[in-house]
Image (cartoon, coloured by chain):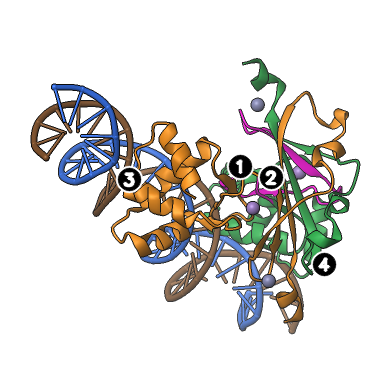
Chain colours: A green, B orange, C blue, D brown
Amino acid sequence: MSDLLERLRARGWRLTAQRRVIAEVLAGEHVHYTADEVHALAAGRLPEISRASVYNTLGELVALGEVREVTTDGRAKRYDPNVAESHQHLVCSGCGAIRDVRLSGDPLAVLPEEERYGFTVSEVAVTYYGRCPDCAAA
Amino acid sequence: MSDLLERLRARGWRLTAQRRVIAEVLAGEHVHYTADEVHALAAGRLPEISRASVYNTLGELVALGEVREVTTDGRAKRYDPNVAESHQHLVCSGCGAIRDVRLSGDPLAVLPEEERYGFTVSEVAVTYYGRCPDCAAA
DNA sequence: TCCTATATTGGACATTGTCCAAGTCAAGAA
DNA sequence: TTCTTGACTTGGACAATGTCCAATATAGGA
Ligand SMILES: [Mn+2]
Ligand SMILES: [Mn+2]
Ligand SMILES: [Zn+2]
Ligand SMILES: [Zn+2]
């Protein structure tokens, strides 16, 4: 994901060791880590990295639109580097596994005009809940 | 909402003063309070009510299906007594206002079979984000 | 190499929620 | 009505997640 680092440099970011390892952790396209998980993984490569830097960097990446914040439960937010492909999420209530899912239609289409109350609707988050094959078997 | 209290008694609940005031706070059909808001409102009528009782009671009401837990941001969960009518939520990014919205179609219909990965999907939460008329004007 | 605006750090603090031992009380029994 | 008892409530400790800040370090241009 040096593409990401390039884009960040182009936006005037200083390329610090901390930001590099965080970008590496998020390099997989289908990860949905919490800030704490990002911190633990980053610390594997750069032991002295602080929690504050992880929170700072994740917040900046979200503000730049390079990473998407995902809330699947009332717990910690998750950070999703897959912003290229429009998608929603499917969550296992048993083990917490998260899958990206691509919808066959726009969820905005099922929100009637008279149910918008004059709002300018700009975004929609859809989260499906169920049991994954492993958890259904158990 | 003495209907609720009746149902709870039928299920073997002791009708304590604490549970009564919490039920009263949730009596409006279109409220979406956080636990802290429920606590503050309940304390208006029963000053000595504890946070623990509010959390306990809300958790029990959710377990019984009398109240629905709603997560619209990464912050505090909200408690929704409107379980009779299937609905989703529209949230203002400016002021946090929450409106109930009734969809014209089932969001499950736009999740293709091949995007289910063998999950048994049982639930779906849809949250629309936008700006309410007041916040759009400002 | 040096300078300095920007970034990082540790730790204090805030918010939201859970847990527990001790005390209290709702409601059925007598 | 009073008694009894198991369910309920309470305060406060603790946990998880996140924010903020003053002091320190450093990336990258001069
Ligand atoms: Mn995703
Ligand atoms: Mn609602
Ligand atoms: Zn599972
Ligand atoms: Zn608004």
Q: Is residue D5 left or right of residue A13?
A: left
The span shown in magenta is: A70-97
Are both tags, 2 and 4, on one chain? yes
Q: Secondary structure at mark 2?
A: helix
Q: Amino acid at mark 2?
A: Val
Indicate the chain on which mark 1 is placed: A
Q: Which residue is mark 3?
A: B16
Is residue A104 or residue D20 the one in the foreground?
A104
Q: Amino acid at mark 4?
A: Ala
Q: Amino acid at mark 1?
A: Leu
Q: Is residue A95 magenta?
A: yes
Indicate the chain on which mark 3 is placed: B
Q: Secondary structure at mark 3?
A: loop
Q: Secondary structure at mark 4?
A: helix
Find the distance from the CA under tag 1 to the CA under tag 4. 26 Å
Find the distance from the CA under tag 1 to the CA under tag 3. 48 Å
Q: Position of residue C7 (x, y in %)?
A: 63, 65
Q: Quadrant of residue A17?
A: bottom right
Q: Position of residue A31 (x, y in %)?
A: 72, 40
Say if mark 1 contacts mark 3, CB within 8 Å.
no
State which tag comes first along the sequence, 2 or 4.
4
The response on whether ligand 1 sits within 8 Å of label 1 is no
Q: Is residue A117 left or right of residue B62?
A: right
Indicate the chain on which mark 4 is placed: A
Looking at the image, residue A49 lies above or below residue C18: below
Q: Which residue is mark 4?
A: A10
Is residue B125 or residue A50 the one in the foreground?
B125
Say if mark 4 contacts mark 3, CB within 8 Å.
no
State which tag comes first along the sequence, 2 or 1.
2
| Residue A56 visible in the current orientation | yes
Q: Which residue is mark 1?
A: A41
